[in-house]
Image (spheres, rainbow, N blue to C red):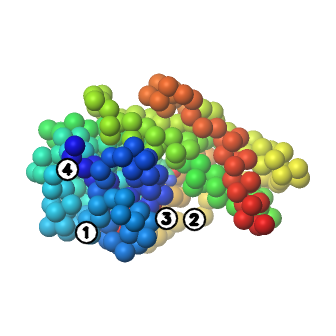
Amino acid sequence: MSPILVTGATGRLGQLIVARLVEQKRQVRILTRRPEAAHGLFGTTVQIAAGEFADRISLNAALRGIGTLLLLSPISQRLAADQIGVANAAESAGVRRIIKISGSDWTIDPPGSSISGDAHAAVEQYLRRLPVESISLRPNAWMQVSLAHTIAQVLAGNPVTAANLDAGIGYIDARDIADVAVHLLLAEKIAGGALNLTGQAVKTPRQIADLIATALGRRVAAIEKRPPAVSLDTDFEHRAVAQFATLIAAGRAAVTTDAVASLLGRPPRSVENFILDRLAAEAALAG
Ligand SMILES: NC(=O)c1ccc[n+]([C@@H]2O[C@H](COP(=O)([O-])OP(=O)(O)OC[C@H]3O[C@@H](n4cnc5c(N)ncnc54)[C@H](OP(=O)(O)O)[C@@H]3O)[C@@H](O)[C@H]2O)c1
């Protein structure tokens, strides 16, 4: 069986995807600009291809003999160009399936709401035209990013803050995104298009504050706070994040779907369990 190439493998979601593939005894190759760091993370369990998106020669070498590609890159001005470059190189190398980690559905649809959503949309459209089987996963906000940050803030003695305390989010656990991605990488057949991945319930910042308060057995304040102002010279990632805050405050992320359950045959992981596990892990670290 040909190896699976994972880009973004050393990042937050990529590591979870690689771990699952290795556990299932799949041959995995990763593309990284930091082969030594990757070796520290994965040892000899994966093939390490040193290279980067903008370097077609390194891409071609990484893609040699690959049948399936997991396409992930960070939010940046280069997102669309980088991912389209990888997709082109993959097609030339004879890759048969591409699973793309896309932006949250509410950043992509309707167009023009989010600079990073628009960049992901451009890649999705490109993939649809490519003669390669592909699917784009559009995960809602990840528990391991914004919710983990909220928990860390509370543990540091700060309140829960949000632009709108009553605008909920259908948070998804990144482990569920990884489970879905691996399922689709290995499935015999996939439906094309895009999948809106969410957790099982919408939670507002006010409810999150209450859940953390109950778990800690103390009061946790929740305060409304405007998102930081951004100017045109603010970098792409920070502009994108500020747009996310505005869209979330307008209730756009308050969505759940049954995509995770219908693919995996079990419900998505819950916010309640994530909060309890995080607090237990932090307590264990604190000693
Ligand atoms: N966080 C959320 O709530 C959320 C929601 C929906 C969608 N997303 C999407 O998730 C993606 C981010 O995932 P993440 O947080 O797991 O990423 P991350 O932790 O920021 O990791 C970025 C990865 O990209 C690799 N990379 C960066 N520049 C590269 C280059 N020029 N050439 C080759 N590799 C490069 C890095 O590898 P090396 O450093 O090893 O080279 C690293 O593995 C974004 O596309 C974002 O839109 C996130």
Q: Secondary structure at mark 3?
A: helix
User: Alpha-carbon neighbours of circle 3 within 10 Å: few (<14), some, or many (≥20)?
Assistant: some
How far is mark 1 from mark 2, CA to CA?
36 Å
How far is mark 4 from mark 1, CA to CA?
16 Å
Labelled disc at residue 229: 2
- Seen from the viewer's position, the closer of residues 94 and 126 is 94
How far is mark 1 from mark 3, CA to CA?
26 Å
Q: Secondary structure at mark 4?
A: loop
- At 70% from the left and 57% from the top, the residue drawn is 281
- At 10% from the left and 51% from the top, the residue drawn is 92
Q: Amino acid at mark 2?
A: Ala
User: Alpha-carbon neighbours of circle 4 within 10 Å: few (<14), some, or many (≥20)?
Assistant: many
* Residue 12: image location, x then y, percent: 48, 58
Q: Earlier in the sequence, mark 1 or mark 3?
A: 1
Q: Nearer the viewer's eye, disc 1 or disc 3?
A: 1
Q: Amino acid at mark 3?
A: His
Q: Do callouts 4 and 3 mark residues in contact (Cβ within 8 Å)?
A: no
Q: Is mark 1 within 8 Å of ligand 1?
A: yes
Q: Nearer the viewer's eye, disc 4 or disc 1?
A: 4
Labelled disc at residue 66: 4
Labelled disc at residue 195: none
Residue carrying label 1 = 51
Q: Nearer the viewer's eye, disc 1 or disc 2?
A: 1
Residue carrying label 3 = 238
How far is mark 3 from mark 2, CA to CA?
10 Å
Q: Earlier in the sequence, mark 1 or mark 2?
A: 1
- Seen from the viewer's position, the closer of residues 36 and 89 is 36
* Quadrant of the rendered image containing residue 199: top right
